[in-house]
Amino acid sequence: MSERSAPTDTLAGTPVDDALGRGVAALLRAQDDAGWWKGILDTNVTMDAEDLLLRQFLGVLDPTEALQTAAWIRSQQRDDGTWATFFGGPPDLSTTVEAYVALRLAGDPPGAAHLAAAARFIIDAGGVERVRVFTKVWLSLFGLWRWDDLPALPPEVVLLPRWFPLNIYNFACWARQTIVPLTIVAAHRPVRPVPFDIDELHCGPDGAHPSGTGGWRARTFGLLDRVLHAYERRPLRRVRAMALRTAEAWIVHRQEADGSWGGIQPPWVYSMMALQLQGYSLDHPVLRAGFEGLDRFTVHEGGTRRLEACQSPVWDTALAVIALADAGVSADDPALVRAGRWLLDKEIRVAGDWSVRRPRLAPAGWAFEFHNDHYADIDDTSEVVLALLRIDGAAGGDGLGAAIDRGVEWVVGMQCRDGGWAAFDVDNTHTLARGLPFCDFGEVIDPPSADVTAHVVEMLAALDVEPHARARGIEWLFAAQEADGSWFGRWGANYVYGTGHVLAALAAAGLTSDDRRIRRAETWMHTHQNADGGWGEDLRSYRDPTLAGRGASTASQTAWALLGLLALGEPDGHVRRGIAYLVDSQRDDGTWDESLYTGTGFPGDFYINYHLYRQVFPLMALGRFAAGGAGG
C-alpha cells in the first residue's frame, strides 16, 4: 500500500489501517491471474428449478445433475416448507411451486414431509391458480397447465413497426430478450408430459387468463387478450410463418460469444427452447454453445449444483479497482494495471439494441458480463471510466485515454430527454407495456434511475467534462428526490443505496451541505443509522414504504451510507460509528460476512446477493475515511 498524507485514525482500539490492510489482502487474493474479479451472484431457486425443467424439456436431464440440483433446492427450503426470493424474505408462491415441481421431477415423492409442507403453503396461498404467468408457462410445457389459460403472446409482435406503441423496443432489453423467444414457444404450444401430476396443488377450476375487470386499462387489455386468443386459433399462415422466421433470426443474431443471451437466465433458457422448437438439433452450434455457457454459469459446492442467474465480472472488476485505489494501492500497482488492461480489452465497439434509438451514436462502453456485446450499459461504463481514472495512464497503455473518451461520449449520447440516465436504453418509458397480462414477471421498461444517473454525474465531475449534460443530470436528480430527502435505489437496496450514491455524486459535482436539499438527504441518512452504528434496509421496502432505510445492518449498505456522508466533508459522529461498525464486523481473513441480499434485479420481484459487494464497498469507505473523508 502507498503512503497517505492523512493520519491513521483509530476506533475502538482497532486501527483502520489494519482493517484496510487485511481487506486489501483479501481482495487481491480474489483476483484472477487475467486481471478480473468476479463474485458469485446468489438469487433464488427458480433458476435451479427451471434449469432442471429446461433439461427435461430438451431431453438431456442427467440423473446426477438432477440429484445435485435437488439437494441445493432442498437446502434452501425454510422450516415452514416454503421458498423465498431472497434470504429471510417472505414465502413466495411461484418460487415454491417451481421448487416443488422440480423436486418431483428429481424423484421426491409428494408424501415426503418437505413436499407436504410446501403443498400446504401452496394451497393456503391459493394454489397454482395464483402463480405468475411465467410459472404457468413452465407448467404448460409439461401438461400441468393449459396453454389456453395463459395470456396470448403471438410472435407477430416482432413484426410491429417501431412507431407502434407495443413494439418490442418499447420493452426493456431484458424483457424484449425474454418475450421474443417466448412468442415462439407459445406459438408452438408444446406439451411434453412428465410422469406425475400436481393435482394436490390445485384449489379450483383452471380459469387463468384475465377477465378484463379493474379499470379501463385492465378492461382494454382484457379485451385485447380475448382478441389475440381468437387470432391464435386461426392465425394467418403466411404472417405467422414470417413472424416465426423473424423472431428466430432475431434470437440467433443476439447470442453472445459465451453462448448466452444477454448473459442472463430467462432469455437464455427460453431462446434454447424456442430454437429447438424451430427445428434446431441439440448438436447445432447455437444450442451447443448455449449448453456450454450454462455449464460456465454453474456453481458446484458440497455435493450441490446451482445456477447463477447472471455474472458480473466487468462490474466487479471496476468496483475492485476503485476500492483498492481508495484503500491506498498505488496507481501503477501490477494488480491494478492487469485489471485496467483486462477492462480495456472488454470495451464494446459494436452497436447493440440501444442503437435503435441512437443510430448515429458511435458504439463504445462496457457491459456487465464477460461477453455481453449487444447490451453495453450506462452504469457499468460509468464505473469502468471511474476505475480507469485510478490507474496510471502510462502503465495502463496508450489506449486508456481514448477508451475513456469514447465511453464518455457514448454515455452522454445515451442521456434521456428528461436529463436522467437509464441502464441500457434511451427514453424507454412507455408504461403501456406494463399493462399486458403477460407481463407479471417484474419491471418491463427501463426508465432513468437515481443510482445510474448519479454514477454518470460522478464520472463527468471526475473528468470535469460535459457541463451541460452534467447540469441536466443534477437537475433530474433533484426532481427525483423523495419528500423525506432520500432517493430511490433501482439497482441496489434501496433508499440507502440511492441516497448514498447520489450524495457522493452531488458532492463530486461541487454541491455541499449548504444546499438545503443536500442537508435533507444527510439528515435522512443520519436518522436511519442503526444503534450498532451500521445501516441496513430490508428488501421489502420496495413494497412497504415504512421500511425505507430500515433493516439489519450490513457491510455493503453501511458502506453506501458512509460513502455519501464522507463525500460531504469532515467525518462526524455518525460517520465514526459507521466506520467502527465496519472495523468491528470484519472477519479475521479480511472479509465481511453478508447473508442478506442487497442487490436488486426487479424491485419487488427479483433480488441478488453480490458476494463481492461485502468486500469492495467497505474498503472504499474505510479508505476514504483514512484518507481524510471527502475523497474518492
Image (tube, helix red, strand yellow):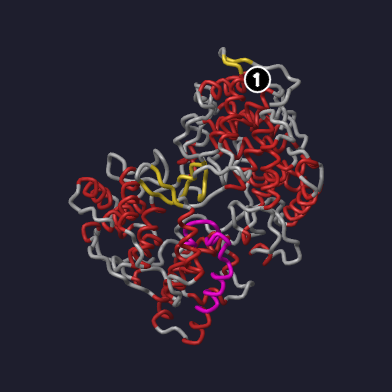
Which of the two residues, 348 or 609, is positioned nearer the viewer here? Answer: 348
Q: Is residue 533 above or below residue 310?
A: above
**Magenta-colored stretch includes residue 248:** yes
The answer to whether residue 224 shows anywhere in this view is no
Number of labelled discs?
A: 1
Q: Secondary structure at mark 1?
A: loop
Q: Is residue 129 above or below residue 155?
A: above
Residue 222 placement, left or right of 526: left
Q: Which residues are magenta?
A: 244-268
Which of the two residues, 243 or 374, is positioned nearer the viewer here? Answer: 374
- Residue projecting furthest to the top: 13
Amino acid found under the numbered disc labelled 1 = Asp
Instruction: Give me the residue at 61% from left, 75% from top.
Output: 161
Which of the two residues, 560 or 502, is positioned nearer the viewer here? Answer: 560
Which of the two residues, 213 or 87, is positioned nearer the viewer here? Answer: 87
x and y, in percent, of residue 45 in the image: 38, 50
The answer to whether residue 626 shows anywhere in this view is yes
Q: Mark 1 sits on what residue?
A: 572
Instruction: Give me the residue at 49% from left, 29% from top.
Output: 553
Residue 372 placement, left or right of 221: right
Mark 1 residue crowding within 10 angstroms, few (<14) / some (14–19) / many (20+): few
